[in-house]
Amino acid sequence: MKESILIQELFSSGKLQDDLTEIVNKITHTVRITPDEALILYEKADLGLLGALANQIREAKNGHFTYFNRNFHIEPTNKCVFTCKFCSYSRLIQQSKDAWELSEKEMLDIVRKYDGIPVTEVHIVGGVHPKMSIHFFANLIRQIKELRPEIHIKAFTAVELEYMFRKAKLSYEDGLKLLKDHGMDSLPGGGAEIFDEEVRNLICKDKATAKEWLDIHETAHGLGMHSNATMLYGHIESYAHRIDHMNRLRELQDRTHGFNTFIPLKFRNAGNEMSHIREVSVTEDLRCYAMSRIFLDNFTHLKAYWPMIGKSTTQLLLNFGVDDIDGTIDDSTKIYAMAGAEDQHPAMTTKDLVELIKGVGRLPVERDTLYNIVRDYSQVEFDEKKSDFHALPILGQ
């Protein structure tokens, strides 16, 4: 393995600083590093070393497999009671420009557009709207399951859930049980942002706290519901804040083993109150993902959300610890397009995803939400005349 050779050459050359030598030795022997050691590594190691370590871990956990799924999004509304400074997506309740609020029928019509198309997951997230209560969404979920009993419903960030539960005067456990009983299967990882209380107070002070986010996910895991975890990076936070964030997730994963994957999310600066902050470079993207793979030793998967990070950077990240690139999303998701992401109309067919993965020597595998393998595409050749893949419909056409 080329990474092992590179690491051994660094050891034998004496080019590694003493403190890095001990840390790298622990990582290569699968010994957990501490937050303090992670910070030293983050600050002092060059990109090549971080990439080699991350890729070694990635291949030990997942080989050359790179996962994707067939999914679509429902974004019920972008009207929101909260005013996160980094958000380009939400509109205040009283605003009408660029705002939307889908009816129950409109959301069910989105589901019907996929009749006969083998999608395995619907992802439901949006703004926090006071009129869209837990009972409104429970009824929506029930009807989605009636239309597509086999589909996995991954719905509502912990921020959305905290508001719903508080307004309905329900405990986290009772609220999650209600949604689960109506057909909700798992939680996405959004709303985590950065857990550090001081930073959080500066960028999103009026929404769910770090403790509330973590408590909701821990409660969900206790009920047998899996979830994802995210981190918003590249704004006013430091490397130490990133390590602290991941350490809180690592500690929760030790207790519950309920997280499916970790997803670093790059701050985009278009159309928000933090637009004066320059976006970080691709090099910094690679370092962040590599450190995530190295530090989160109890997370099996690391995902690059390609509509956010871009297709080219996604390919690079497949050699920096990433083993999942999300799904065949159509352009129904607007969250990152509105923040200035490279893909303003994010859409990829199964063929597109397979070719993107094969283009960097990885093996494409379609998965379901819980990482059960649906189909191995590593040996599949697509017939241009008679394709065995489905192009997802573009909503609005």
Image (spheres, helix red, strand yellow):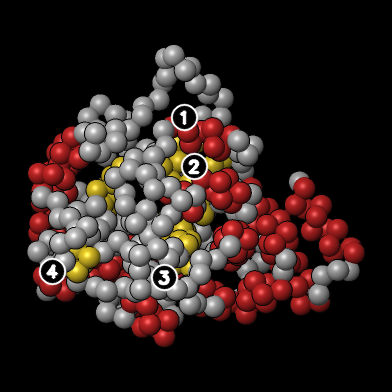
In the image: residue 194, left or right of residue 296: left
Gap in angstroms between the C-alphas marked 2 and 1: 13 Å
Toward the viewer: 196 or 384?
Answer: 384
Image quadrant where residue 218 sits: bottom left
According to the picture, the residue beneath numbered tag 1 turns out to be 351
Q: Is residue 43 above or below residue 267?
A: below
Q: Between marks 3 and 4, how big is the CA–CA gap?
A: 23 Å
Earlier along the polypeptide chain: callout 3 or callout 4? 4
Res 81 label: none
Classed neighbour count for the residue bearing mark 1: other residues with Cα under 10 Å, few (<14), some (14–19), many (≥20): some
Q: Are marks 3 and 4 in contact (CB under 8 Å)?
A: no
Query: Where is mark 3, residue-wise?
Result: 275
**x and y percent of residue 352 in the render?**
47, 33
First of labels 3, 2 by sequence position = 2
Corner quadrant of residue 22: bottom right
Q: Identify which amino acid the numbered label 1 is placed on.
A: Lys
Would you place residue 237 above or below residue 316 in this image?
A: below
Which residue is the site of mark 4?
94
| Sequence-earlier tag: 2 or 1 | 2
The answer to whether the residues at label 4 and label 1 have Cβ atoms under 8 Å apart is no
Say which element carries label 2. strand
**Label 2 belongs to which residue?**
67
Q: CA distance from mark 2 to mark 4?
A: 41 Å
